[in-house]
Image (cartoon, helix red, strand yellow):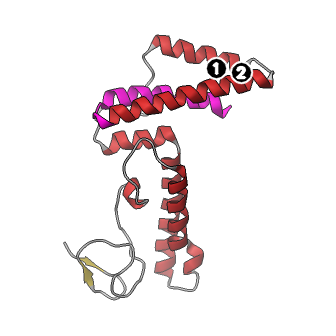
Amino acid sequence: MKNKCWSCSKESSKPEFFCIHCGKIQEGVETNEFEFFGMKESILISIDKLEESYLRLQSKFHPDKYINLSEKEREISTIYSSKVNEIYEKLRNNVSRINLILKLSGFDNYDEGKSFDDPETLNEIMEIQEEFMFTDNLKIKQKIKDKVNKMIKETLTDIEKYFENNEYEKISKNNIKLSYLEKIIEK
C-alpha cells in the first residue's frame, strides 16, 4: 500500500512521520508504543534509554518547532507531541507497561481491574502496607521501602521469565501483585 503525502502528493512505500520527498510532518502514522519509541517490547527497560527516546521525539514533534509553519503541521505536531507524553508515562510505569505488553500480545484475559487471588501474598502485602502506614519512625519506613523495593525487583524478574515463556496468565497475576507493591512505595 502506498502512502501519499498531504503536502507534495508524492507516494512512499511505507508510512513515515516525515515525507521522504518534501520533509513535511505526516499525519496518521500508526505504530505500537514500543515501536514509536524505537524500543524492543520488554518487561524490563532502561529508563535512561526511554528518556533519551522521549527527548529525541519531543525535539522532533514539539509544537514550538512548528509555530511558523502551516496550521496542519501545527495540528499534527500537537497530536504527536501529546502522544509522546502519553506513551512515555505508560512505558515508564512498570504496571502500565506490562498491561500494554499483555494487550499487545493479545492476552484475552487482560483486565486492568482484575483483583489479586493469592490470599497468602495479599495478606503479606496488606501487613506491610499497614506497618508502613501506621509508623512515624522514618528508619522503619525506609526499611519497609527497601523490603518492598526488593519484592518489586523479584516480581519484575519473575514477570520477565514468564514473558520469555509466553505465560500471560502468570504475567497478569504477578502484575496485579506488582501494582499493590508499588502503591505502598507511592505513599
Q: Residue furthest left?
A: 1
Tell me the residue that label 1 is attached to: 129
Q: Is residue 68 visible?
A: yes
The image quadrant of residue 135 is top right
Mark 1 nearby-residue class (10 Å; few <14, some 14–19, many ≥20): some
- Tell which of 94 and 155 is nearer to you: 155
The question of residue 80 being in magenta is answered with no
Q: How many marks?
A: 2
Please provide percent x and percent y for residue 124. 56, 14
Residue at 70% x, 21% y is 132
Secondary structure mostly seen in magenta is: helix
Please provide percent x and percent y for residue 161. 36, 32
Please provide percent x and percent y for residue 85. 54, 58
Q: Is residue 110 visible?
A: no
Residue at 54% x, 12% y is 123
* In contact (CB < 8 Å): disc 1 and disc 2: yes
- Tell which of 48 and 70 is nearer to you: 48
Q: Amino acid at mark 1?
A: Gln
Residue at 25% x, 82% y is 11
Q: Is residue 165 above or below residue 68?
A: above
Tell me the residue that label 2 is attached to: 133
Q: Amino acid at mark 2?
A: Met
Mark 2 nearby-residue class (10 Å; few <14, some 14–19, many ≥20): few
SS category of the residue bearing label 2: helix
Q: Which residues are magenta?
A: 164-187
Pick the quarter of the image with the N terminus. bottom left
